[in-house]
Amino acid sequence: MNELVTGDAVVLGLQPARLPSRALAIAIDLAVLLTVFVLLSVGLAVATVTLDEAAIAAITVASFLLILVGGPVAVETLSHGRSLGKLACGLRVVRDDGGPIRFRHALVRGAMGAVEILGTFGVVSCIASLVSARGRRLGDVFAGTLVVRERVPVGRTLAVPPPPPWLVGRFAQLDLSGVPDGLWLAIRQYLTRMNQLDGAVRGSMAERLSTDLAARTGVPVPQGVPAAAYLAAVVNERQTRDVRRVAAAADRSHLTPGAPVPVPVPTNREVPGGLRSAEVRPGGGGSPTASDADKDGAVLPPTTGFVPPA
């Protein structure tokens, strides 16, 4: 698996960089560093013409380490993993968990780079990158880092199908606090891709996910409700609550202390994820029902992908 996954089972949208792009970025960085080193060496040669050979050799070694080793370390630390070559190729160095690198990560990568890139003319780093499943060289392995692509083609975002109208608002009293993020992610991925699955696989996955979700909420799946429709309705309820919470927080920030806090609720409008929610009576009285949506006169989508029970 090449994607980065956090400890909460959340897949990050980062793709590891491969050898060709990394080699091009390193070539650009080395060209810049060698140019700076040559210019600095010429200036030092003119300034140290009166010194003996031992002093000139010591200054040359110190400048070599300062430019070719300390330079990449300083640049990656200050830019949080973006050197000039990586910036040109759309790459960035990050930690294994996707976070920005710090000085110790850049120091280990720079020290190992002097050995595997400069010392072996890049042979060791190329072999390590080809063998690694995520294209990491030895410096990345020891530092716990990874080079990822920042500029990737933007794919089409799949929307979660809306639940059937007869299920909208039915789970308004459901306690969703015990559902982990990993299960929400699995349910969303299933709903966005269920039409691409085989019928038997689609049914078994829906049953398993609905069973896990019911176990987390403490309420069994209602009789006669298809598993996939149940999942879509619960996801819709969660997204509706998120919209309420964000809207309430935004309104609260503009109110004076002690004033009542109105909670605006979406009424048959698109909410994140492509789901719809029925109208909720103002003041919080009652729960949203499909009949409320009918009274509002809104036009529901002609099909939701789910069939109501007979």
Image (cartoon, helix red, strand yellow):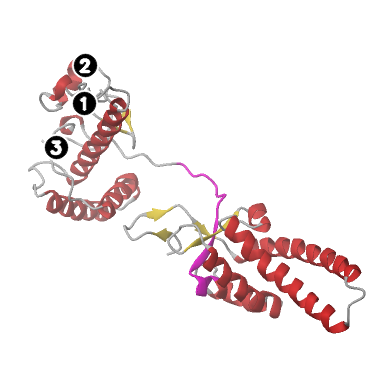
Q: Secondary structure at mark 1?
A: loop
- Mark-to-mark CA distance, 2 and 1: 9 Å
Q: Which mark is residue 171?
A: 3
Is the residue marked by circle 1 packed among few (<14), some (14-19), or many (20+) residues within 10 Å? many
At label 3, which amino acid type do we have? Phe
57 to 297, vertically: above or below: below
At label 1, which amino acid type do we have? Ala
Residue nearest the observer in this picture, 299 or 85? 85
The quadrant of the image that shows the C terminus is: top left
Residue 126: x %, y % from top left: 63, 74
Q: Secondary structure at mark 3?
A: loop
Q: Which residue is mark 1?
A: 278
Where are the magenta residues, as a range? Answer: 140-156
Residue 197: x %, y % from top left: 32, 51
On the picture, is 145 further left or further right than 83? Answer: left
Sequence order check, earlier mark of 2 and 1: 1
